[in-house]
Image: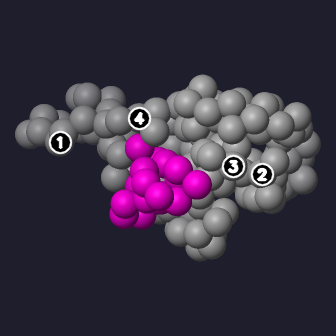
Amino acid sequence: MPEINTDKVCFVIVKAREIEAEDEGMQPDASNPSDDKFVSVLTEAGYSPNRRELAEFIEAMDVDEQAELVALAWVGRGDFSAEEWDTAVIEAKERRKGPTSRYLIGIPLLASYLEAGLDAFDEGCEGFEEDRQ
């Protein structure tokens, strides 16, 4: 059973969803922005505060919480079952190379995997958004 605070996982889910909703953008060119309906301003660089905030939040966690967050994503992705939780956490600690935030933010569908991981332990984020407002 995960020991990481569910609210922390839910915050990561919310931020990951925000990042998933961002426009990948396009490379600037010599065209006139007003002629292009200003689509060139919708670049990834314009949304970096979300990515930076999530990375800083994850890196502020202790090593055990980071390993559990990775393990929870793995459980949600189907790499491990809930019964294999301890093994998943050990693997997450052993496989760690570089910042955990970079690894997690690089996982497509991270928010969905974390939600599925919480669900495997009968946890969820119901009411989390209302508590944040």
**Apparent side of residue 66 relative to residue 32 in the rendered image (left or right):** right
Are the two marked residues, 4 and 3, in contact with CB atoms closer than 8 angstroms?
A: no
Is 101 situated above or below 35?
below
Q: Earlier in the sequence, mark 4 or mark 2?
A: 2
Classify mark 4: helix, strand or loop: loop
Local crowd size for mark 2, using a 10 Å CA cut-off: few (<14), some (14–19), many (≥20):
some
Q: Can residue 57 be seen here?
A: no
Is 111 situated above or below 99?
above
Q: Which residue is mark 4?
A: 23
Between circles 4 and 2, the one closer to the viewer is: 2
Between circles 3 and 2, the one closer to the viewer is: 3
* x, y percent for residue 51: 47, 55
Q: Which residue is mark 3?
A: 86
Are the two marked residues, 3 and 2, in contact with CB atoms closer than 8 angstroms?
A: no
Q: Which residue is mark 1?
A: 28
Give the residue type at disc 4.
Asp
Classify mark 2: helix, strand or loop: loop
Q: Which residue is mark 2?
A: 2
Q: Marks 4 and 3, Cα distance to the nearest angstrom?
A: 37 Å
